Image (cartoon, grey):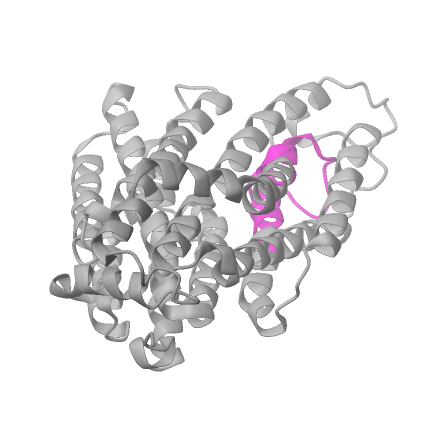
Amino acid sequence: MSTPRSQCCGTKLPSYLGFAILGLVNTIVPFVVFSANYLIIPYPRWVVILIETLPALATKLVLPHFLHHVPYWMRPLCAAACCTLVAVVTNVTPPNVAPPLRIFTSVLASSAAAAMDVSFLGMTRYYGRAGLAGWGAGVGAGAVFCAVLPFVLTVWMEAFLRSFIDCIYVLAGAMLVAFFVILPGAPVNYPDTRQRRCKDDIEDGPEGAFHIVHPLEELARLLSAKNRIALTKTAVRPFMVPLFIAFATLAVVFPGISRALPISPAFDTFFSYFTTYGFFFQLGGFISRTLTPLFRPRSARVPFAVLGLVAAVLLINAPLSIFSSSTVVGLLAFCAGLMGGAIYMIILDKVLEEKSSEPGINQEFCLQVVGAGETAGSLVGGLLGTILEASLCTWDIGSDAPHRWCQTAR
């Protein structure tokens, strides 16, 4: 019989804490690099979105097919090396230097973060819901931190965004501690057990279906390109498409059309408005990513319906300027983030519990590849949000209606 997850990976608290730190680090590091490179100055927003998102999408689509060749223990070491390299290059590169070098560090940070996303999500097949819940909480907390970091650094501390780049060294160290020290002793931390664990996955299949085939032959079949492509096709409709739709909608809501929304009298500048709007949006995501695993909803229909309604209200309000209350806008942003985070956790939980993806090797691959739907949605939604914002900002709202943020110099 196969080893139960609880015996293989120890208690739930270390699993939760370890994955929470991994998710936190993996969210903050690329954001710090993107912010320090100031690519929004020489390039329009849609170009910056492509630079920061396309490498991650390519990584999530391609890497799961080859990642099994890299031992688990080597992956965070490679990621930490990439983080250190990016921090060093960014530190010694002035913001007024030619863009190609800054583009390189942004692409490297995006690819490294996507690679760790793929690897860590695949590892949750050993740690179960405790690992997945920790990962969701860490990613959500990192997003909240990133939402307020620019305002805290530049306004409260009167520093530059580049001032935070040295913290990447600490974050890379925290990632290694979380992986090698905090996470319980599962096979992922021991290079000499990788092949044995793979054989155990085959021999201990759900109904002994593979006992008639030599384990190594079956392992070769499971790792073949034909089987991986077939698994990807089966994961598209139930898992990747919902993530794509959800994150495309989220990207339109924030940061998407934020500049096209009516000016709120409660804020003196767009920077403070944008920070508050983003904070409530990401806070909703953090709460739902943290609490959804406790309630374990089986369907994402209600979150999808609420998310669509919130997006529709914001899109209607942008051209018509029906309301400009910061309370209403913040509540809508909070609801959008809340529903988006719930959808993310529901879909990943379904992948984790999907019986058709057993044995564990297939399940691990499915967990790795479905994240491409999230990134593809963020890419398409980000580009669509840029187009919508530009169109809405040229909309004539009349002299009596509140002006939009994109129509003021504040």
- Main secondary structure type of the part rendered in magenta: helix
Residue 57 image position (x, y, % from top left): 41, 34
Please state if 298 lies on the left or on the right of 395 as rendered: left
Q: Position of residue 104 (x, y in %)?
A: 25, 27
Of the pair 362 and 85, the residue shown nearer to us: 362
Q: Residue at x 23, y 68 (%)?
A: 187
Judged from this view, the residue extending furthest toward the front is 212
In the depicted structure, whether residue 85 falls above or below residue 18: above
How many numbered discs sit on the rendered protein? 0
Foreground residue, 39 or 150? Answer: 39
Observer able to see residue 180:
yes
Give the x, y percent position of residue 314: 75, 39
Residue 318 image-quadrant placement: top right
Please provide percent x and percent y for residue 56.
Answer: 38, 36
Q: Which of the image's four quarters has the N terminus?
A: bottom left
Which quarter of the picture shows residue 263? top right
Q: Is residue 231 left or right of residue 4?
A: right
**Residue at (66, 66) in percent of width and height:** 297
Q: Is residue 161 left or right of residue 80?
A: right
- The magenta span reads 253-280
Q: Residue furthest left?
A: 192
Q: Left or right: where does residue 37 sit relative to residue 376?
A: left
Is residue 160 in view? Answer: no
Q: Is residue 250 magenta?
A: no
